[in-house]
Image (cartoon, helix red, strand yellow):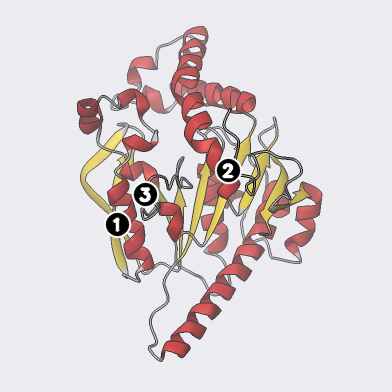
Amino acid sequence: MLKPPHDQPAQGDPTFPSPYISLSREEWAERRKGTPLTLTERDLERVRGINSDISMQEVVEVYLPLSRLLNMYVSSTQSLFETTSRFLGNPAERVPYVIGIAGSVAAGKSTCSRLLQALLSRWPNSPNVSLVTTDGFLYPNAELERRGLMRRKGFPESYDVRGLLDFVARLKAGERQVRCPVYSHITYDIVEGELELIQEPDIVLIEGLNVLQSERAPDARRMFVSDFFDFSIYVDADPTNLRAWYITRFLKLRDTAFQRPDSYFNRYAGMSDDEATAFATTIWEEINLPNLTANILPTRARADLILHKGAAHDIDAIELRKI
């Protein structure tokens, strides 16, 4: 086995200082410091995912402290931008604060993203908060078929990385109107000819499986989406729990979205519980778990904040990067 250079610690070396401060949910909740609750139960119902029963208590104990922290970070970043503009003597418009949100399939990162969008947009200054998922930058199914990648959909090579980079670079260059492709989870494909307009955003949330990737070798000059993030979050959970949540979600979708005649997955709508469970298990073991192991989980250590979920799908611990 190759050993790391003498001045570089091996991954997982317990003697190497952790770059994170670890907090229990109770310790984290104390950091709310009076941040007002601006969501109602009806608001929360709109942001819940099909496999999420996130409670108002979790909003209060986890997401309000996070909203407070992000408010402080955004304000500090804007102050630094203004300082730099004064130094250069060339005032410029602010660029959006970009937050990356990563994690496995079924981890709940989409619900996390929608909830943060709702909370951040309710700050007193009413910022314009946009949410973009990297699904829109998947290659169309026809292109994935041509490349033999349909069974690797969601793996890094299935994305139009150049298009995604161009989109994020334009945001951070200060362009006030930027368009991105639209993805349909019903047809399981890019919506041809449809673009979403992101207009004058103050904050942009970018959610996706692989947004924290940064494999720099062999070309250190190569740029990555994560290079443009001001802050990043990883929604973490044990793979055994993720597998169970994925299967549960598949069964729920079989009874709901898959019933639509225009659904790509309508062919699975008539499966029995046993058939659906077996099929979902195969998809997890052959596609989602390998992607998690090889591509997604290794990026966890690059996040500024890790939200860890327990078996009940609720956040039980938080790690905040200190260095």
Count residues near mark 3 (Cα–Cα under 10 Å), then give few for <14, some for 14-19, many for 20+.
Answer: few
Is residue 49 visible in the rendered image? The answer is: no
Q: Quadrant of residue 69?
A: bottom right
- Mark 3 to mark 1: distance in Å? 19 Å
Q: Residue at x 31, y 70 (%)?
A: 175
Q: Residue at x 44, y 85 (%)?
A: 85
281 vs 121, nearest the viewer: 281
Q: Quadrant of residue 217?
A: top left
- Mark 2 to mark 3: distance in Å? 22 Å
Disc 3 target residue: 219
Count residues near mark 1 (Cα–Cα under 10 Å), then give few for <14, some for 14-19, many for 20+.
Answer: few
Give the structural element (helix, strand or loop) at label 2. helix
Do residues under tags 2 and 3 come within 8 Å of each other at their CB atoms?
no
Residue 317 horizontal side relative to residue 259, left or right: right
234 vs 38, nearest the viewer: 234
Disc 2 target residue: 300
Quadrant housing the C terminus: bottom right
- Mark 2 to mark 1: distance in Å? 24 Å
Do residues under tags 2 and 1 come within 8 Å of each other at their CB atoms?
no
Disc 1 target residue: 166
* Residue 130 placement (x, y as % from top left): 43, 59
Do residues under tags 3 and 1 come within 8 Å of each other at their CB atoms?
no
Give the structural element (helix, strand or loop) at label 3. loop
Mark 2 or mark 3: whose residue is earlier in sequence = 3
Q: Residue at x 67, y 51 (%)?
A: 59
5 vs 129, nearest the viewer: 5
* Residue 207 placement (x, y as % from top left): 46, 48
Give the structural element (helix, strand or loop) at label 1. helix
Name the disc covering residue 155, or none. Answer: none
280 vs 41, nearest the viewer: 280
Residue 155 horizontal side relative to residue 41, left or right: left
* Residue 191 placement (x, y as % from top left): 25, 41
